[in-house]
Image (spheres, rainbow, N blue to C red):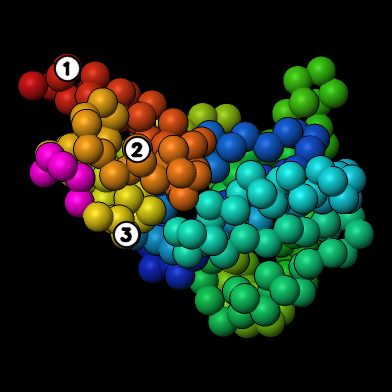
């Protein structure tokens, strides 16, 4: 289950962003992945509006998100406007129940309209001044897909908090790429400053994404302040 939005018994959390307009927020992708792992919901990542990118920019984007393959998170790049990649996602989600989330303005309604025919959703627009989407979905709706299964549309959001992770060990367990390497020198290694840390070694050797590692350190800092506040 997920708390925000409140849904249960779902197969996937589809995390949707736009390649441009609004620009992709990589930190928020990592935060949503962390949330999915915390609530034990399988995540997938969908990047819409690739028609705004040059071939070079698309290659750079795929490289930036290549860490997803290493943590077994499927990624799909699509264009609702040019009907690119939509059937591939439809086939993947067939006969499953999927909740879709992401910021406003990334084309969730357009994508859901492709997947279903029962209820055509209103599509939004982008604020030119803020480069941010305008909300078109006010509440969560479960919609039957043409191919079979269900898609749960959710309101766009402007903020999301770090889940209520209890301790450092639990946080580390939510980073799958940390679990497939040799043990560090110290059993209680925080993977930040200790000598003989194999996580830091993997980052230095580009085997673990530096962006993911930086997100881990930032999250640990946020949680440490929270834990100290409640001690």
**Which residue is at 68% across, 37% downward?**
24
User: Cα distance, mark 3 to mark 2?
Assistant: 13 Å
**Which residue is at 22% across, 31% downward?**
195
User: Cα distance, mark 1 to mark 3?
Assistant: 32 Å
Identify the image quadrant of residue 45: bottom right
Residue 222 to residue 143: above or below = above
- In terms of depth relative to the viewer, which is nearer, 226 or 4? 226
User: Which is nearer the N-term, disc 1 or disc 3?
Assistant: 3
Instruction: Describe residue 167's horizontal placement relative to residue 103 as left or right.
Output: left
**Which residue is at 32% across, 24% downward?**
222
Q: Does 186 appear in magenta? A: yes
Region of the chain picked out in magenta, as a range? 183-187
Which residue does the numbered mark 3 point to in the structure image? 180
Q: Position of residue 122 (x, y in %)?
A: 79, 50
- Callout 1 crowding tier (Cα within 10 Å): few <14, some 14–19, many ≥20: few
- In terms of depth relative to the viewer, which is nearer, 59 or 128? 59
SS for callout 1 = helix
SS for callout 3 = loop
Q: Is residue 2 visible?
A: no
Quarter of the picture containing the C terminus is top left
Residue 133 to residue 183: above or below = above
Instruction: Describe residue 52's horizontal placement relative to residue 41 as left or right.
Output: right
Q: Main secondary structure of the magenta part?
A: loop
SS for callout 2 = helix
Which residue does the numbered mark 2 point to in the structure image? 200
Q: Position of residue 154 (x, y in %)?
A: 57, 50
User: Which is nearer the N-term, disc 3 or disc 2?
Assistant: 3
- Residue depth check, mark 3 versus mark 2: number of the one nearer the observer: 2
**Which residue is at 26% across, 51% downward?**
173
Which residue does the numbered mark 1 point to in the structure image? 229
């Amino acid at each position: 289950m997920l708390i925000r939005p409140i849904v249960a018994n779902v197969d996937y959390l589809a995390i949707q962003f736009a390649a441009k307009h609004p620009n992709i927020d990589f930190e928020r992708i990592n935060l949503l992945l962390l949330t999915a792992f915390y609530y034990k919901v399988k995540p997938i990542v969908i990047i819409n509006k690739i028609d705004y990118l040059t071939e070079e920019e698309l290659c750079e984007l795929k490289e930036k998100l290549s860490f997803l393959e290493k943590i077994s998170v499927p990624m799909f790049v699509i264009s609702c406007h040019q009907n690119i990649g939509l059937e591939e996602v439809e086939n993947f989600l067939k006969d499953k129940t999927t909740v879709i989330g992401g910021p406003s303005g990334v084309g969730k309604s357009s994508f859901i309209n492709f997947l279903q025919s029962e209820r055509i959703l209103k599509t939004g627009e982008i604020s030119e001044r803020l480069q941010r989407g305008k909300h078109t979905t006010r509440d969560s709706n479960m919609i039957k897909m043409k191919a079979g299964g269900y898609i749960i549309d959710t309101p766009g959001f402007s903020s999301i908090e770090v889940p209520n992770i209890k301790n450092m060990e639990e946080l580390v367990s939510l980073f799958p790429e940390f679990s497939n390497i040799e043990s560090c020198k110290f059993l209680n290694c925080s993977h930040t400053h200790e000598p003989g840390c194999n996580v830091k070694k993997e980052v230095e050797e580009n085997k673990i994404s530096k962006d993911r590692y930086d997100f881990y350190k930032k999250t640990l800092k946020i949680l440490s302040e929270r834990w100290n506040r409640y001690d």
